[in-house]
Structures are given as structure tokens and as C-alpha cells.
Image (cartoon, rainbow, N blue to C red):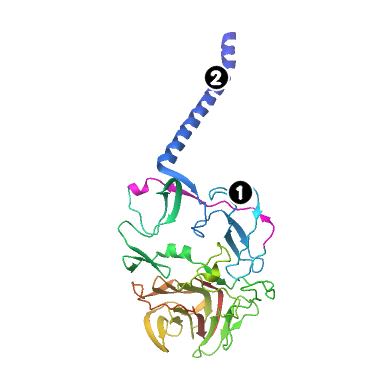
Amino acid sequence: MIETEHQYEMQPGRDRAAEVANTFEWLIIAFLLAFVVRAFIIEPFRIPTGSMAHTLMGIHFRLRCVQCGYRYEHGIGNYNVPQDMIPSNDVDVVSSRCPSCGCYQPTGGKMPISNGDRILVLKSLYQFVEPKRWDVIVFKNPLDPSVNYIKRLVALPGEEIEIVDGDIYIDGRIARKPPMVQDALWMPVYDNDYRPVKPQEESFNPSKRWHNPFNLNGSQWEIDRDDPTNFILDCEAGREQTFFYDTSRESSANNFRADYAYNSVMEFKHLPVCSDIMVRFYAQAGNRGHIGIVLSKYEILYRAWVDLEKGKMIIARVFEGTESELASMPVSKTLINGPVLLKFSNVDHQLILEFAGEKLKYDLGLFPDSAGERTSNDQMQVKIFGSGKLNISHVAVFR
């Protein structure tokens, strides 16, 4: 009886030893599985630089404009450390420019930095499927295999690639990006939801006071007194009224140069103009009148609008004073009781008008000269027009 009690008392000790051994066994198995998975199946990578911003971020500052509150990311510059090394301490804030209102942000002081984005890569994926254009891929630098490159794939083996006016051409024909890819690549030019709190300060492009870049002069469009981010119109259905995005020298507005907030503010003045543009807003209207957008491309104007009385979406070309219809289609929604998205873009030699979830497209051609001949003094034009009783909100311009 005593021996049995002694054996019973020792049983918990043996159970604990078995539990510890079992735990170590599982840890070893987990370590081996992790090693195998990392070596042959999935490997994590951290984005070291801003070459893929803003789709994938390298080491950067997370900033908020002191004037309008717009949030954006900005590269930290060169701190004499390798690109894949993160500074351990806060670093000096570098000069930046708000991508929406154009305010030059004050320098001085220090800020913590944000690590680069991290991605998981399927290492054996391309053993089973072929790489696809526009995929984000990781590959070794052929000259230094210890360095990993993370880029977007634009050309495949055997193809001839050209970059003309920022567009990708494969074997002489334009390579159009899928909507999901293009949506990630639009860069803000101006967002009317973000308005400076001290527009009288001379801290905007270039050392000027801020004025709303949308010029309403000569039209019946007005800024809504109850909500200054909205534009309102109340006129006869047949009397078209137009206002425009002003990029003249007297304006403080951001222009359409191919810069973005992540880069140095010293670069943007010398960069080329981007001719792919998109404008979007939300519209409220009755069943009379019309609402639309004008975009330019190589000195040609393209008008896209919704005729609320006829229930049609229309895209037209205006050149040397002559307007010609390019495409049209009926729309099911003509009475806009609540805010409805209206978007018009000129991208990859395509005109795309979107209204209430319906799309109208027109193809400008596949070749570099199909959309016209670019001149060195191209000035991009953006206009919004309409008639009847309208209220538009969340107006933004992208390039």
C-alpha cells in the first residue's frame, strides 16, 4: 500500500517531464517546417527603397500637411547608411511638398521613421504558371546576387519595349494596365476636400498665397456656403456653365508634372508633363440638364458628359473648334437623388467615362502617334461643366 502511494505521488513529475519533452519536440518540428517553408515555398521581404512607392513603401516619413491635413508619405533621403538599413534613432525631417494643396512643409526637428512594407513571396510559383505583365516580382540582381530587386514586370522574354510619354509599348503597341493596377498608380494633383487653414500665408507653389485652383470666373457655378468643398449650380437646363482647373503662372495650384510626394521637392520643376489624367466627383442633380468633364490630350479636348434629359452618356472630340461625337450609350439612372460617382479618365490611349457604375469607353489607338502629336509646350486642361440644378462634392484631380 505504501509503495502504491509512493508511485502515485511520483506520477505528476513524470507527466511534467513528458510535457517538456513533447514541447521541445514540437518546437524542433516547427523550426524545421519554418526552415523548409522559407527555403523552398514562401520567403518574406522588406521593401528597402521608395522605387515602388506608393504601391510599396520603402523606409519613409508619414507626414500630414500643416495647412490642409492631407496625409502622405515622403522618403527619408540619404543618411550615409546602406539602403536596407533602418536608422536606429529619430532623424531630421526633410523638406517636402503637399501633393494636394502644394504647401511646402516646414523643416527642422526630428521624427521617427516608418519601416518599409513587407511582402510574402511564393518562391516556386513560376514553376507552375508563367509570369504575367504587371505582376510585382522579386528577383536577384544579375551582377550582385546578394541584392534582391522588387519591381513591377512590364515586359516578357523576346519582347521589344519602348516608353513613350510615360506609356509602355510592347512590340510597337501600347500595353494597357488592368483597372486594379491603374487604380494603384494614380497620383493626386488636387483634392478639394482638403483646404488650407491659413491660405494667406505665402508657403504655396511657388511662394504664393493659396487660392482655390478651380476658377469659377465667368460662370454661374458657386462655392457652397454651407460646405466650401462643394460646388453648386442653379441655371436653366440649356445654358451650359463651365469652370476650370487653373495652372497659370498666377495660380498656386499643383501642375501636371510627373512628380510625386515621396520624392525631393527640388525635382518637380524640371520633370515632364504627364498627359494621362483622371477627374472624379460625386454629383446630385434632377432629371434636367447635364453634367460633364473636359480633359485635354496633345492639344485636343475630349468632352464626356451625362445628358440627364435624354438618359445618355456621351464622349466627344473637340479640335480646332469642331466637336464630333466619338461614343455614346444609354444610362439607366438619370434622376440623381443622392451622390453618384462621375469619373472621366484619359489613360493608356483610352477615354473612360464612368457614371453610376456604368462605363463608356473609346479607344484612341494602339500606336504612339494614334492620339496625336505631342508638342513641347503642352498645357493640360481640366474643366467641369453642366446645366440645370447641380451639386458636386469630393472633387479631385489625378494624373
Q: What range of the chain is rendered magenta?
A: 107-127
The one of 310 and 96 positioned closer to us in this rendering: 96
Residue at 51 percent across and 59 percent down: it is 53
Say what secondary structure mark 2 lies in.
helix
Residue 331 drawn above or below residue 127: below
Q: Residue 59's spot in the image, x, y percent?
A: 56, 53
Name the residue carrying label 2: 14
Residue behind mark 1: 87
> What kind of residue is marked 2?
Arg
Q: Which mark is residue 353?
A: none
For label 1, the SS is loop
Residue 5 picture location, percent across and down: 59, 13
Q: Earlier in the sequence, mark 1 or mark 2?
A: 2
Residue plotted at (41% across, 88% down): 320
Amino acid tagged 1: Pro
Q: Is residue 233 magenta?
A: no
Q: Label 1, label 2: how many angstroms apart (C-alpha)?
A: 50 Å
Is residue 250 shown above or below 75? below
Residue 265 percent across, percent down from the top left: 58, 66
